Image (cartoon, grey):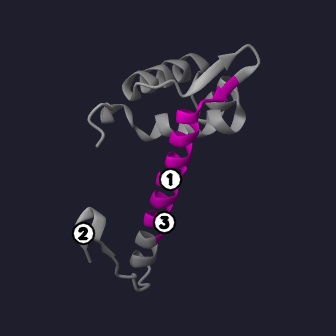
Amino acid sequence: MLTSINLHRLDLPSLRLVVECTRAGSLSAAAQACHMSVSGASHKLARLEEGLGAALFLRHRRGLEATEAGRRVALASLEIFESLDAMARLLEESKAGVSVVRAALTSAGLHA
């Protein structure tokens, strides 16, 4: 259960920033990739870490190094973005008249 985590801090731009920081190892490169200022990215990352109650990166003079928590958040974020991309493709196919695959999502309690 996620009771100790402030879920309001889990916005998509913050998760994208974690992915980019993990990839680049640099806050300035990640900020540029996310179309943010370095200062804005730094504040967003700090707020996310505060909300999660965990340091996601070790900050060094030469850049960032993802902690175990940071790597886990980055991997989970990639899965979220992949799911969102798949959803967008399904919606586009639906608009184009392509049949949509029906699936039962029992863990979420949803059935199609």
Residue 62 within the magenta-colored segment of the rendering = no
The residue identified by callout 2 is 110
Give, as a three-letter code, the residue at label 1.
Answer: Phe
Crowding at label 3, few (<14), some or many (≥20) Cα neighbours within 10 Å?
Answer: few
Give, as a three-letter code, the residue at label 3.
Answer: Ala
Q: Is residue 87 visible?
A: yes
Q: Which mark is residue 81?
A: 1
Crowding at label 1, few (<14), some or many (≥20) Cα neighbours within 10 Å?
Answer: some
Which contiguous range is marked in magenta?
64-89
Q: Are marks 1 and 3 in contact (CB under 8 Å)?
A: no
Is 50 displayed left or right of 19 in the figure?
A: left
Give, as a three-letter code, the residue at label 2.
Answer: Leu
Q: Earlier in the sequence, mark 2 or mark 3?
A: 3
Which residue occupies 68% across, 39% down?
23
In three-dimensional space, the C-alpha distance between marks 1 and 3, rounded to whole angstroms, equals: 9 Å
Kindly report which numbered mark, 2 or 3, lies closer to the viewer in this rendering.
2
Residue positioned most to the top: 61
